[in-house]
Image (cartoon, helix red, strand yellow):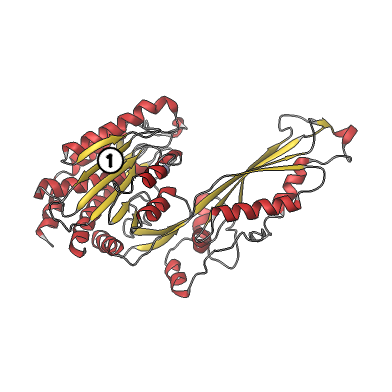
Amino acid sequence: MSDLLEEALAYAREHRDAFVQELCEYLTIPSVSAQPEHERDVKMAALWVVEHLRQRGLSAELLTTEGAPLVYAEWKSSHTHAPTVLIYGHYDVQPAEPLELWHTPPFEPSLRGGYIVARGADDNKGQHFAHIKALECLLCTTGALPINVKVLLEGEEEIGSTHLSRFVREHPELLKCDCVLISDSAMRSLQQPTIIYGLRGLLDLDITVRALEHDVHSGHYGGNVQNPIMALAQLLAEAKDREGRVLIPGFYDGVRALDAAERAQLARCAWGEAEIKKETGALQAFGEPEFTPVERRGIRPTFEVNGMWGGYTGPGIKTIIPAEAHAKVTCRLVPYQEPAHVGAAIRRFFEQRCPPGVTLEMRIGPGSPPTLLPLDNHAMRAAVQAATATFGAEPLFELEGGSIPVVHEFAHTLQKPVVLMGFGLPEDNIHAPNERFALASFEKGIEASVRFMIQLSATS
Ligand SMILES: [Zn+2]
């Protein structure tokens, strides 16, 4: 082990308790971006972390955007050829409600059973704080970092990163780097590090079907006018077959086929019917039969009705034919589908099938594209080496079913490798009551980050 690594890891062990205390202090700030009453707290969290970074020797500042401020910090190496890593994270958190389900108050961090329990402990304060502590371990032992570091933390991730994509597009010079490192995901377990190499994109649409000027008497008019709820249900039912395949022509355009090697690699992930049933209470797994659950989550797009409403839903009976009906639909998109192309295919499909007697109105959002991250680059190799040495096992490579739009923006605008190496665990209750972060995740996260930076400096 190199002296640098040895010293940095020794520093981490010696300051273990202090690091946990500092994270707890960060977690007391209720930086809930979704709730206007916490606007000040969001800013407080940003100021807190800026001050923290400054005290560790980085130049840090708040950058104002139209929304929550961005935290930007950097450290420049004296070595002219040192590579630059951009570390991204978010200091905002999800709302804590429902409060009554928390065993301890969400913004009073408590240490229980090897976990730090608090809103934001895993998602994402604990995870990016591990990187900040790794920087400290290197800076406080050697007085220097082996690479150039830029840190970018946003305060609007939990509300859709409203302003970040534009910021990235408008500041490519500021964010110029050789790779981006993001820890905002989970590992399979503490013995099984996991690197995400693909994310699904998203497309959202609202559908309204109108049949009448106002609700009417179902006795006077029943049998003589369209029922918009029925018309909408029939339209939606035509979009998918009974086994879960989407029947909209053009929907699957661009979807990539897996080769045998990638299929075998994905099959290493032990996530299937049993896990789905346990995690969700589903009676059975359901989806395109020609794919495994891991494949359906990673490489297959979806068409899901998120909500549908109309007419009377109160107590008793109300004998009406409703005037209109509504549905919200979101599609998860996979490489190399294009949101606009999918949106147009869906619009065409429903417009062609719109039954007589109703009008159809569709609002289709711009969507966010899917991302597939290349694995063959120096940053990914450094991450594999760091994760393997830290956790004692080679990382699994997984395709994530969710979306992190800014990852696409980083990969696309900066044209550099992005590494998604998360330190959370599946049972961390993110976005739910009693969110937590294992102390071991925090410690190992710091170690993996230290190793990554040293490895990156050695191989670049
Ligand atoms: Zn989150």
| Nearer to the camera, 343 or 107 | 343
User: Quadrant where the N terminus lies?
Assistant: bottom left
Circle 1 is placed at which residue position?
A: 72
Ligand 1, image quadrant it occupies: top left
Residue 410 lies left or right of residue 359; in this view the side is left
Residue 410 image offset from top left, x and y in percent = 37, 52
Residue 456 lies left or right of residue 373; in this view the side is left
**10 Å crowding of disc 1: few (<14), some (14-19), many (20+):** many
Q: Secondary structure at mark 1?
A: strand
Residue 132 lies left or right of residue 285; in this view the side is left
Quarter location, residue 69: top left
Residue at image point 43% right, 64% down: 269
Residue at image point 72% right, 39% down: 325
Residue 221 lies left or right of residue 57; in this view the side is right
Whether residue 28 appears in this view of the structure is no
Q: How many marks?
A: 1
Q: Amino acid at mark 1?
A: Tyr
Residue 423 image offset from top left, x and y in percent = 32, 51
Residue at image point 33% right, 30% down: 43
Above-or-below relation of 77 to 264:
above
